[in-house]
Image (cartoon, rainbow, N blue to C red):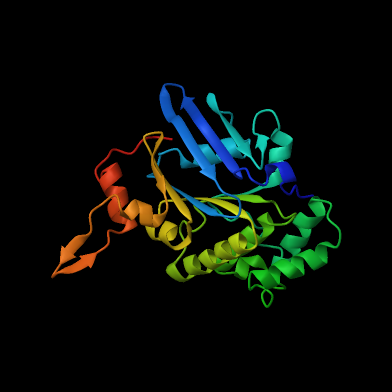
Amino acid sequence: MSIPPTTDRVGQPAIHVQGLEKSFKHLKVLRGVDIDVARGSIFALLGSNGAGKTTVVKILSTLLRADAGTARVNGFDVVTRPADVRESISLTGQFAAVDGILTGRENLVLVARLRHLKDPGAIADDLLRRFSLAEAGTRRVVTYSGGMRRRLDIAMSLIGRPPVIFLDEPTAGLDPQARIEVWQAVKELAKGGTTVLLTTQYLDEAEQLADRIAILHEGRIIVNGTLDELRQLLPPAEVEYVEKQPTLEDVFLTLVGAGTEKEQR
């Protein structure tokens, strides 16, 4: 079952985070994180290893409880309404959670049945078409390429039509062609009205996909804006009298510092 946004929540952000804090023993991972994600948008959360990106996702998906602050997903508080939050979201982790022994279609049918949805076969066929996997649907997933497996994983996460999806480093370890395939799948999600929160270390990935980008550093959001807004933080470079706009990588390394010691998550 899916929970679409009700009328009184339509004008609110799909994800609202304020003052989020989290520590593991003496290590402060989050030090007051504030985020708003508009409905139907792609929001990229950037940060180095150990910056706390996965911790944010775990809190928003009710897998972890924050020490302080508030968070709402699809209008539901993650602490007081965790069941409603879980009905509203889907989470795709860093590794594809698919069964290699089953075919692509069988993986999708299995999840649809577990969610007690009507006509799981039709749901599976529709998703195979949407993610360009129809011809491979009867093949065992063990024969799929990395990009195909990841596309299938994302397709599985859409069963039940959750309004919000979390993608935690969805292209980690994929080759360039597979990454492009996943990017296209993510763009299609947003076109269909799904809100996507994406964590990534790949700056070009954020440039390609995100409507808004936030950089998480030392437990805090140090910048949050569109790609154009972030580029304006640095002056354009002039090379032979030709203005060169700074890349997102320039912005990230200037704000965070290329030699900053990475924190442990």
For image coordinates 84% across by 52% down, the residue present is 116
The location of residue 59, given as percent across then percent down, is: 57, 35
Quarter-wise, where is residue 130 in the image?
Answer: bottom right
The location of residue 37, given as percent across then percent down, is: 54, 46
* Residue closest to the far top: 26
Q: Is residue 47 above or below residue 112?
A: above
* Residue closest to the far left: 240
For image coordinates 53% across by 69% down, the residue present is 181
For image coordinates 75% across by 64% down, the residue present is 106
Residue 146 visible at all: no
The number of callouts visible is 0
The location of residue 120, given as percent across then percent down, is: 82, 62
For image coordinates 67% across by 51% down, the residue present is 163
Residue 253 as seen in the image, left or right of residue 265:
left
* Residue closest to the far bottom: 135
Q: Quadrant of the C terminus?
A: top left
Q: Is residue 90 above or below residue 59?
A: below
The location of residue 140, given as percent across then percent down, is: 68, 69
Residue 186 as seen in the image, left or right of residue 100:
left
Residue 182 visible at all: yes
Residue 18 as seen in the image, left or right of residue 264:
right
Quarter-wise, where is residue 264 in the image?
Answer: top left
Q: Nearer the viewer, residue 171 or 224?
A: 224
Residue 248 as seen in the image, left or right of residue 205:
left
Q: Nearer the viewer, residue 8 or 170?
A: 8
